[in-house]
Amino acid sequence: MAQISQADPNGVMRQAQTALRTLGGCVALLRVPGLAASGNDAEQLGLATPSFQDLSLGPVAWHKANSNSRLMVSAEAVLQLVQSFASDSAEVLFETAVGVLIDDTLYTIANVVTAEAVGSPYAYWLTLQPPVR
């Protein structure tokens, strides 16, 4: 693996992105609440059916062992979502999300850990809980 200099913190992020793509990952979608429609009386009264958006998390690595499920997400993909939705941070984006959709199963996000190198995030580990059946 190439050595990353202190001057190139984005190099680690690019390496993580490449590694996740190479691993063949799975498809994971971040389910977030849809935008409210202004001027809609039913929306203002809470009578409208809530809408959701499913956003691609890009390359991910899925690790499932017994009841423990973890998802490694590229920081580059998360950064693009944070910027496109004008979110304050990746943490806020994950906190406001309804969950993560994998193979038609909606998992709730129990915990988020940021993996950093050279002071910059390169990946996020999401601890997921399966739905109660």
Image (cartoon, grey):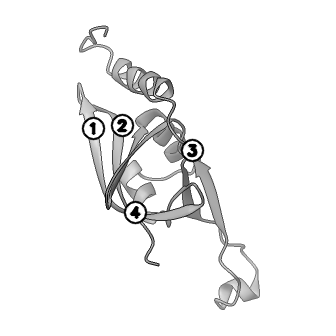
Say whether marks 2 and 4 touch (CB < 8 Å). no
Task: Read off the residue under disc 2.
Answer: 123
Q: Tell which circle, 2 or 3, labels the residue nearer the N-terminal end.
A: 3
Task: Read off the residue under disc 1.
Answer: 115
The mark closer to the camera, 1 or 4, is 1
Relative image position of residue 82 (x, y in whole percent): 49, 46
Task: Read off the residue under disc 4.
Answer: 95
Identified by mark 3, the residue type is Val
Q: Tell which circle, 2 or 1, labels the residue nearer the N-terminal end.
A: 1
Q: Tell which circle, 3 or 4, labels the residue nearer the N-terminal end.
A: 3
- For the point 53% across and 41% down, the residue is 26
Where is 91 relative to 8, above or below? below
Identified by mark 4, the residue type is Glu
Specify few, some or many for label 2: CA neighbours under 10 Å numbering under 14, 14-19, or 20 or more: many
Distance between the Cα atoms at labels 2 and 3?
16 Å
Say whether marks 2 and 1 touch (CB < 8 Å). yes
Secondary-structure class at tag 2: strand
Task: Read off the residue under disc 3.
Answer: 27
Where is 19 relative to 64, above or below? above
Compared across the picture, whether 21 is left or right of 19 comes to right
The mark closer to the camera, 2 or 3, is 3
Specify few, some or many for label 4: CA neighbours under 10 Å numbering under 14, 14-19, or 20 or more: some
Query: Residue 91 has which mark?
Result: none
Distance between the Cα atoms at labels 2 and 1?
5 Å
Say whether marks 1 and 4 touch (CB < 8 Å). no
Q: Tell which circle, 2 or 4, labels the residue nearer the N-terminal end.
A: 4
Relative image position of residue 131 (x, y in whole percent): 45, 71
Distance between the Cα atoms at labels 3 and 4?
20 Å
- For the point 34% across and 22% down, the residue is 12
Secondary-structure class at tag 4: helix
Identified by mark 1, the residue type is Ala
